[in-house]
Amino acid sequence: MKRTLFIIFNLVICISVLIGCKATQTSSEIAFDFEKKIVILNNGIEMPILGLGTYLLSPEQTENSVYNALATGVRLIDTANAYMNERAVGRGVKKSGVPREDIFIITKLWVSSYDYAAEEIDETLARLDMDYIDLLLLHQPYGNYLEAWKAMENAVSEGKVRSIGLSNFYEEKFSEIIDIAAITPAVLQVESNPFFHQTEMREFLKPYGTVLNAWFPLGGRGNTQPLFSNEIITEIAEAHEKTSAQVILRWHLQAGNIAIPGSSNPNHIRENFDIFGFELTEEEMQSIKTLDRGHGVLEYTDEVGELFLSWTFDFNDQE
């Protein structure tokens, strides 16, 4: 009898441990597949973990950069209504000859169109000259973002959009979306780099399975040199015979951040994508962890919100 109770007790302990392990795995960091260069989002869709950003690129630069990136093997392209280069993204995709289904396109709705988001989604598709958007984000947490979220959910049900998420939404605003959402945000795009790790936000996102997508992954145009010349970064780069940019981008991926560095330089685009042949050690990852300053270049205030709400664009008035 005692032996039977002992066996049952141990079975209960084993089952508890297994359940505990499963729970821990579910709430842990989202696993990136470095061989396939993808992550599986919380809706089951595969998303590339490294891509091309097109912020501040002219239409001509955008078309050429998209073409060069796709020729290099990049399969993730990020744009936005407010970047005024969506048409150029569409042209670059077609020019590349890469099948549309092999490319993952992100774009974003601007705050001025939240009130008529359904119509803007159709116009966005027309500008891109595509049948669907892989990931559609709300660009800023201002304006009528709750109704816009519902419009994006409807677009998913209609097959116009595959995944939806948020950009620049901090914890409070993200929670407001969660309260009314039928679809959990798949991705949150925020500023992040070795000087700003977004540690608290990453912890906040874990229960939702929402992946963090870093904009300004290299510090942002005009702010890259402090990162590139940082002693810790340069020492790691020398150890691996890589550039500072490659080390930083590799850090992003190993930290669990999708990265979308922007560039109009074909050599830089190739360099940025050539980061899958080496790996940072745990010691190196910990060294980069010490660089975190806990803040980025853009802080969200009521004044910033008012400024964004005042910005209106004719998104169709682009080359």
Image: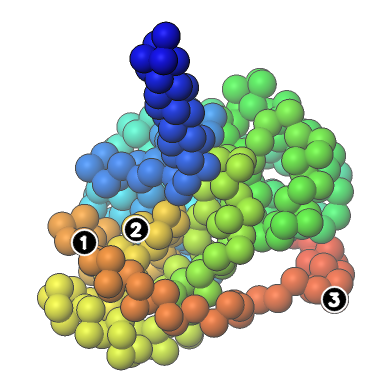
In the image: residue 26, left or right of residue 312: left
Q: Check disc 2 and report its element: helix, strand or loop.
A: helix
- Up the image or down, 195 lies above or below 140; here it is below
- Type of residue at label 3? Glu
User: The C terminus appears in which quarter of the rendering?
Assistant: bottom right
Residue 161, horizontal then vertical, whole percent: 59, 31
Quarter of the image where one finds residue 210: top right
Residue 212, horizontal then vertical, whole percent: 52, 53
- Up the image or down, 101 lies above or below 297; here it is above
What residue is pinned by disc 1? 279
What residue is pinned by disc 2? 254
- Type of residue at label 1? Glu
Residue 167, horizontal then vertical, whole percent: 64, 55
In the image: residue 313, left or right of residue 127: right
Q: Residues within 10 Å of mark 3 (few under 14, many from 20)?
A: few
The one of 281 and 105 positioned closer to us in this rendering: 281
| Pair 2/3: label in front | 2
- Type of residue at label 2? Gln
Q: Confirm or deny contact between disc 2 and disc 1 (CB under 8 A).
A: yes
User: The N terminus appears in which quarter of the rendering?
Assistant: top left
Question: Residue at 15% of width from left, 73% of height from top?
Answer: 240
What number is the disc on residue 303? Answer: 3
Mark 2 or mark 1: name the one nearer the start of the chain: 2
The one of 149 and 287 positioned closer to us in this rendering: 287
Mark 2 or mark 3: name the one nearer the start of the chain: 2
Q: Check disc 1 and report its element: helix, strand or loop.
A: loop
Question: Residue at 26% of width from left, 85% of height from top?
Answer: 234
Quarter of the image where one finds residue 208: top right
